[in-house]
Image (cartoon, rainbow, N blue to C red):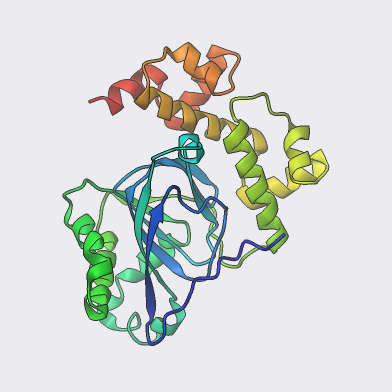
Amino acid sequence: MKPLLFRVPTVNDRSFRVQIDDGPHFYDRLHFHPELQLTLIREGVGTQVVGDRIERFRPYDVLLLGANLPHVLRNDPDYFMSGSTRRVLAHSVLFRFEPLEGSLFGMPEMAHLTQLFREARHGVRVRYGPDDPVVRQLERLPSARPFEQLMTLLTVLDHLSAEPQREVLSITAYEQPRRPDDHQRLDNVFTFLLKNYDQPITLEDVAGVAHLTPSAFCRFFRLHTRKTFTQVLNEVRVEQACRFLQESTLPVGQIAFSCGYTNLSNFNRQFRTITGLTPGRYMKTVNR
């Protein structure tokens, strides 16, 4: 099995790479790379895993992901169905910090970006609207000249460093990559959970996916996510419930059942623990 160290193609005589992801779905494997990644999601919805944080992603999210931070943007199941017309589109800049640390980012005028790059080790997100200037700049990025692309990168980073609405995503920072087979195990586990969250899942089931004994899996999973398997399973199910609450008119009880819960009171309790809201309050908040 190939390791999930993602090799970013280099560009001759360039200190960064501008990348367009335009296709039926995003790359759906948990991966990491030594480059920092600044991404605007223009089209596409689904579940994102950034470090130990599991949430929904949506259009006009801007993400800044630090070096070696495991992440994946997993589109919803209908993107993978035969005959699907769903599409995704994202603009990204990938760059290495080290070559620029002593030159560009070592300048006194760049000192305010230090905190932003520190936060990027955990993943940073800002949710914009389609008409925000940051979105407009990143939308024009692929067609700009290299010098203009560099200026856009610096301008957007400057804006993010002063953005009061930016969110730090993962509790855990990842300074060095784990062993490749650890990443493969994590990818297998998250893929299994995202595909089977609506079914009963036992510790033995998911330990088998990771090819570990249940006790060894519990140690492995907590080491890499700082959470128990049950916590992560509830996060995956509640994130899917949030999607149904936003996109469907199903009653709460049916949504709970479709997300793998057999007890409505347990669903309500887990939903409130993870989101801070009851399902009813959540619906009122997103439908304002």
Depth check: give the residue in front, 288 or 111: 288
Q: Looking at the picture, does residue 85 appear above or below residue 150?
A: above
Provide residue 51's location: percent of width, then percent of height.
Answer: 53, 52
Depth check: give the residue in front, 151 or 11: 11
Which residue occupies 30% across, 28% down?
A: 286
Q: Looking at the picture, does residue 252 appear above or below residue 40?
A: above
Res 138 visible:
yes
Q: Is residue 186 left or right of residue 53?
A: right
Provide residue 77's location: percent of width, then percent of height.
Answer: 50, 36
Q: Is residue 260 left or right of residue 62?
A: right
Looking at the rendered image, the quarter that the N terminus falls into is: bottom right
Provide residue 16's location: percent of width, then percent of height.
Answer: 38, 76
Determine which quarter of the picture holds residue 160.
bottom left
Depth check: give the residue in front, 28 or 259: 28
Which residue occupies 54% across, 24% down?
A: 259
Q: Is residue 172 left or right of residue 144?
A: right
Res 232 visible:
no
Which residue occupies 62% across, 31% down?
A: 196
Kindly give the residue lying farthest to the right in the view shown.
Answer: 213
Q: How many marks?
A: 0
Which residue occupies 38% across, 48% down?
A: 88
Provide residue 8's location: percent of width, then percent of height.
Answer: 50, 71
Looking at the rendered image, the quarter that the C terminus falls into is: top left
